Amino acid sequence: MRRSLLRRVWFFGRVSLLLLGIEACRVLVHRQHWEVLTPNPLFSALVASEVFLLGFLLNGVLTDYKEGEKLPGDLAAALECLALEVQGLPLLQPGAEVTGSLALLANFSEALLAWMQEAGPTLELLEQLNDLQLAIEKLGCLYPAPLQARLLVELAHIRRGVQRIDVIRSTTFVPSVYGMAYIGTAVLTVGLVLSRIEPFAESLFFIGVISFLLIKLLLLITDLDNPFGASQALSVENVSLLPVADAVMRLQRMAEPGPTG
């Protein structure tokens, strides 16, 4: 929580520093009489088009972000359901050895949480998942087909979730539109700074407010494009991994040697 608060403060500070630089440029332009532009209806159209472009980007990245919010809970549920199915196998065949499979599952859950936090190599995580699936399939082949199917379904849910997170991390939402948004924001900001707006004090206020909102929104959209960017120092808005962390603790307790193992 403290780390998240510090990141938000630093995010606000970065935008504020950019805003101070823009306002300083505006003061310099006014003193040097470099105000070469005059506001007209076309300038308003430029502002409206930039707002529309940012709205398009925000709507697009929010789709992946909302899906990303569900993935930690789905993965945690699949891990625990799989563990409970494996833990219950001795009820069907007393004396069945499930401790090794539960240990593999607990180890994989720890690796999954670390991968989601630190964005490690996906291939290594998938290799661990392959080992886990092989061990569970060997264990489940001794039991009825419906039980085997349930085990494989939960493993498929986990694999699908890992692949989806990897795609969300590695894919940028329409890069060409991002380029247009950055160029449009830069052009609009420069245009505001070079415009002849009177009185001067009011121009500082309006230029500051418009620039602040556009720059902060653009940086926020860039951050929201990867809801699993906790490992990135400048990332602020990330989905909660608490469901997976809680599941890891419960799986570790289930993997401890006991009467069910």
Image (cartoon, helix red, strand yellow):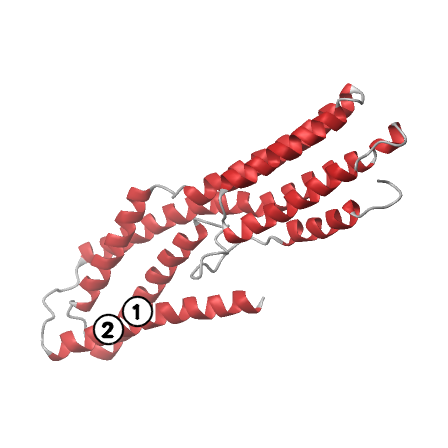
Is 54 placed above or below 99 here? below
Is 36 placed above or below 96 here? below
Distance Cα–Cα, label 1 vs label 2: 17 Å
Q: Identify the residue at horizontal 42%, vertical 61% (top origin).
A: 234
Q: Nearer the viewer, residue 190 or 151?
A: 151
What amino acid type should be assigned to the residue bearing mark 2?
Ser
Residue 81 screen position, x and y as percent: 74, 38
Q: Identify the residue at horizontal 25%, vertical 74% (top origin).
A: 23
What amino acid type should be assigned to the residue bearing mark 1?
Leu
Dot 2 falls on a residue whose secondary structure is: helix
How busy is the neighbourhood of tag 1: few (under 14 within 10 Å), some, or many (20 plus)? some
Residue 54 screen position, x and y as percent: 35, 51
What residue is disc 2 on?
A: 203
Q: Identify the residue at horizontal 41%, vertical 41% (top origin).
A: 171
Instruction: Return the disc, 1 or 2, that comes first in the chain's sequence.
Output: 1
Q: Identify the residue at horizontal 32%, vertical 43% (top origin).
A: 175
Q: Are marks 1 and 2 in contact (CB under 8 Å)?
A: no
Classify residue 177 by image quadrant.
Answer: top left
What residue is disc 1 on?
A: 18
